[in-house]
Image (cartoon, rainbow, N blue to C red):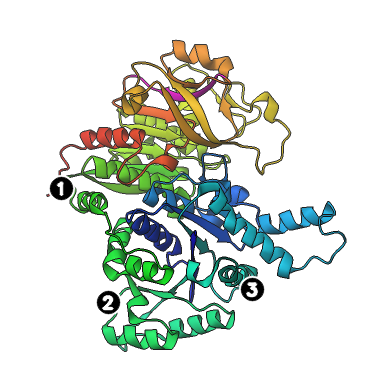
């Protein structure tokens, strides 16, 4: 029988339920179980695909083209899983499905209500991963905080779950904040007590209490909370702030999270194998060198907007035994060549990640020009690849005013443009999404990185390299290093004469792992480390 774990949050948002869920997934996977993580979000958007990054952070994309919450990136990176459309459900999707069914006569004229119709649809989707994956354990994170009005149908659904699958097959974990009052020099447990009480009023008794804290929790505090929350003291788990998110699974295992969950679910207590993960964390904590990477973007005030890119840079650093320092550069500050040179002079490498809209585009082009002329390693992802092409067309091929029609519909040289079959479509769900094949040219930096002439990577974009300019750009020296064979779309461009200057239309950050860095991130950081070779960390 599949076991189901539900993780809820209390007191405040942003406590790290996603990291906790991903860490538990790794802990149980290391015990030999097949584990799948999923997230249910109470907001009414169908998915985060059209949401402003400042509202929601990064949009993570799965192989099958789902635009999902950024926590799915944590799940994949920690458990090395490949998740799918069914791994992320929003209230919007649930209500849309139920209302479409009602319009089609699926309820035979009956009244449609939150209970049972909405909750039954939530339950159906929660069980979908079981039939699709055959997993031993399904870990479900419930977005939001206990007490939120929009979360109530989801709370009711997970309450009902134990009656559907049996109490012995359900485990409820509640993550709360234990604030430290500096003036009183005391950890305060009352917020946790009230949060658990509110959860119990919804009919859910937590089996494990996870305490997010900046200070270590003593045994007396642990036992007091256990007594109030009706759990064993061994099921009160301290979630102390770690140096990096990758230390959290090791801390949680040391705290006894895996043992507590196995006891609740009646799972055999087997040995945990986290040795490789511990070695990776040790490499992260003890770098031998350092590289400064300028991340040139338009959402730099919110670092979560580029979460997978940053984590992938860290992965590249781990592989190269290097500390990666991110220099967050607002593209709008790079107003001309002089401003770009002054702002980027300390960069060992420059990365321009994805994005939409024309704000900051000229600054990104100036960054690409600086990288090309000063021979600084450059990595362009999605929009960053298009920026590389625009800069090359303007300043090497001599096409003054070259641009993307996304930025300037009247450009005389639309080197980046919509495909003919994309015109006139609405925004939501019309991007080229998910995994696509790319044929890699021999002798390129990309082939060296992947060690293969065929690769599959995930996409999330609408505008493409315009093949009308392909031959002219190639004659000017631009290397077309990868092409989608199905539609003859340029996927990878490289610039000769630079130690490492690569632009890719896809998003390799979505498949990078901390103990197996994405090939392009690995080699980009290696080039950046070489660029800053004198900066050896003592």
Report the residue marked by disc 1.
Answer: 537
Check the image and report above or below for 274 versus 260. above
Which x, y percent locates residue 88? 56, 53
Q: Residue at x 42, y 18 (%)?
A: 478
Q: Earlier in the sequence, mark 2 or mark 3?
A: 3
Q: Looking at the image, do the residues carrying marks 3 and 1 touch, with CB atoms under 8 Å apart?
A: no
Which x, y percent locates residue 277? 27, 51
Which x, y percent locates residue 411? 62, 25
Q: Secondary structure at mark 3?
A: helix
Report whether 276 appears left or right of 7: left
Classified by dominant secondary structure, the portion drawn in magenta counts as strand
Q: Residue at x 52, y 35 (%)?
A: 459
Report the residue marked by disc 3.
Answer: 149
Look at the image and give the residue range highlighted in magenta. Answer: 488-496
Whole-number angstrom distance, CA of label 1 to CA of label 2: 31 Å
Q: Residue at x 31, y 89 (%)?
A: 184
Report the residue marked by disc 2.
Answer: 216
Q: Earlier in the sequence, mark 3 or mark 1?
A: 3
Asked if residue 491 lies in the magenta stretch, the reply is yes
Q: Looking at the image, do the residues carrying marks 1 and 2 touch, with CB atoms under 8 Å apart?
A: no
Q: Nearer the viewer, residue 360 or 138?
A: 138
> Is residue 382 something that shows in the picture?
no
Q: Secondary structure at mark 2?
A: loop
Check the image and report above or below for 364 versus 7. above
Nearest to viewer (mark 3 / mark 1): 3
Nearest to viewer (mark 1 / mark 2): 2
Question: Neighbour class for label 3 at 10 Å: few (<14), some, many (≥20)?
Answer: few
């Amino acid at each position: 029988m599949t076991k189901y774990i539900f993780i809820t949050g209390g007191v405040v948002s942003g406590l790290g339920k996603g990291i906790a869920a991903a860490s538990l997934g790794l802990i149980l996977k290391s015990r030999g179980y097949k584990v799948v993580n999923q997230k249910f979000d109470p907001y009414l958007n169908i998915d985060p695909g059209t949401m402003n990054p400042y509202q929601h952070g990064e949009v993570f994309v799965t192989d099958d083209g789902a635009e999902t919450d950024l926590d799915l990136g944590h799940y994949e990176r920690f458990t090395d899983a490949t998740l799918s459309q069914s791994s992320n459900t929003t209230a919007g999707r649930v209500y849309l499905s139920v209302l479409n069914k009602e319009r089609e006569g699926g309820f035979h004229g009956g009244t449609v209500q939150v209970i049972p119709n909405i909750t039954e649809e939530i339950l159906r989707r929660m069980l979908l991963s079981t039939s699709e994956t055959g997993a031993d354990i399904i870990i479900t994170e419930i977005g939001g905080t206990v007490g939120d009005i929009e979360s109530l149908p989801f709370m009711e659904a997970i309450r009902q779950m134990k009656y559907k699958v049996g109490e012995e097959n359900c485990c409820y974990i509640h993550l709360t904040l234990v604030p430290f009052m500096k003036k009183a020099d005391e950890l305060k447990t009352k917020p946790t007590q009230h949060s658990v009480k509110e959860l119990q009023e919804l009919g859910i008794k937590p089996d494990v209490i996870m305490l997010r804290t900046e200070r270590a929790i003593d045994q007396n505090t642990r036992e007091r909370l256990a007594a109030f929350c009706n759990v064993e003291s061994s099921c009160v788990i301290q979630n102390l702030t770690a140096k990096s998110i990758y230390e959290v699974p090791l801390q949680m295992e040391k705290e006894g999270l895996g043992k507590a969950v196995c006891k609740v679910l009646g799972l055999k207590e087997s040995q945990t194998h986290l040795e490789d993960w511990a070695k990776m964390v040790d490499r992260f904590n003890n770098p031998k060198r350092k590289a400064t990477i300028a991340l040139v973007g338009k959402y730099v005030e919110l670092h979560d907007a580029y979460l997978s890119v940053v984590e992938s840079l860290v992965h590249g650093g781990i592989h190269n035994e290097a500390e990666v320092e991110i220099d967050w550069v607002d593209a709008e500050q790079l107003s001309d060549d002089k401003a770009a040179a002054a702002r980027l002079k300390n960069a060992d490498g420059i990365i321009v990640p994805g994005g939409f809209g024309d704000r900051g585009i000229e600054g990104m082009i100036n960054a690409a020009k600086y990288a090309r002329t000063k021979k600084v390693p450059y990595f362009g992802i999605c929009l960053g690849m298009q920026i590389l092409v625009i800069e090359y067309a303007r300043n090497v091929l001599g096409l003054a005013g070259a641009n993307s029609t996304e930025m300037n519909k009247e450009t005389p040289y639309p080197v980046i443009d919509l495909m003919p079959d994309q015109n006139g479509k609405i925004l939501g769900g019309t991007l080229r999404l998910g995994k696509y094949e790319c044929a890699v040219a021999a002798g390129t930096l990309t082939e060296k990185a992947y060690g293969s002439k065929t690769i599959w990577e995930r996409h999330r974009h609408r505008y493409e390299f315009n093949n009308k300019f392909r031959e002219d750009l190639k004659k000017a020296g631009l290397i077309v290093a990868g092409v989608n064979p199905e539609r003859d779309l340029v996927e990878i461009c490289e610039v000769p004469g630079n130690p490492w200057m690569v632009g890719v239309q896809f998003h390799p950050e979505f498949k990078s792992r901390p103990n197996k860095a994405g090939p392009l991130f690995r080699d980009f950081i290696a080039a950046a480390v070489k660029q800053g070779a004198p900066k050896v960390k003592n």
